[in-house]
Amino acid sequence: MIEIEDLSKRFGKTISLDHVTMALNQGDAVALMGANGAGKTTLIRLILGYYHPSSGRVRIAGCDPIKERIDILKRVSFVPQLPPPIKLSLSELIAYVCKSSGVDEGLIGHYADEMKLDMAPNLHKSFFKLSGGMKQKLLIAISLAKQSQIMIYDEPTANLDPKARDDFYRLLQDCEQDKLALFVTHRIEEVEAIVNRKIYMDLGKVVSDEVC
């Protein structure tokens, strides 16, 4: 579903990604690991079309994430480590997501309830002003409601309490079959039970890629 071929990214004289090649397939649940500066976030941003590669290429279901970015983002659910500074109210944000991505509003509500996020009293509040945990719960609820074939999570539980983490992984296990799930994580113990592949990066290169 994601093909990465000889992919490199430079920022000035700094090499952030160094000739990376990999294929991520339907049914894969992948833990992407490595120290800060290993190239993990750069790789994710290249997959999502946020960056232009310095060399090499990325294809998602055969599509170019730069030239066909709008179509790609409809296929992918992404939850970043740091929630974006969205100034919309919760109701405005949900309406925008439903209109732009064709997501069922009731399904967002369902997953929000499962994540123990009480949306009703917060619908008119700015997303920006919510607590970190509430923001993350809503983004997770939206990502699951999209029912995308590709799900990418960058440290998705960083702002969640232990119970919310358990809820997230329970919900994910229920819906990840026949999808591609990619977790950027420092907590391998959290995802070990649900991943079937571990990729470790260092200094912009893939240093190990293990099926488990």
Image (cartoon, rainbow, N blue to C red):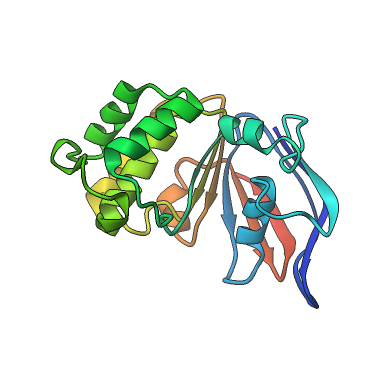
- Kindly indicate the quadrant of the structure image that contains residue 52: bottom right
- Kindly indicate the quadrant of the structure image that contains residue 203: bottom right
Image coords of residue 161 (percent x, y): 25, 55
State left or right for residue 10 relative to residue 130.
right
Which residue sits furthest bottom?
13
Quadrant, the C terminus: top right
- Kindly indicate the quadrant of the structure image that contains residue 38: bottom right
Q: Is residue 129 above or below residue 30?
A: below
State left or right for residue 123 relative to residue 41.
left
State left or right for residue 191 relative to residue 117.
right
Q: Can residue 173 be seen in the rendering of this structure?
A: no
Q: Can residue 103 be seen in the rendering of this structure?
A: yes
Image coords of residue 65 (percent x, y): 71, 40
Question: 168 or 191, which is in the foreground?
Answer: 168
Q: Residue at x 73, y 62 (%)?
A: 207
Question: 74 or 198, which is in the foreground?
Answer: 74
Q: Residue at x 83, y 60 (%)?
A: 54
Q: Is residue 10 above or below residue 169?
A: below
Q: Residue at x 45, y 57 (%)?
A: 81
Question: 104 or 165, which is in the foreground?
Answer: 104
Q: Residue at x 21, y 42 (%)?
A: 124
Image coords of residue 57 (percent x, y): 82, 47
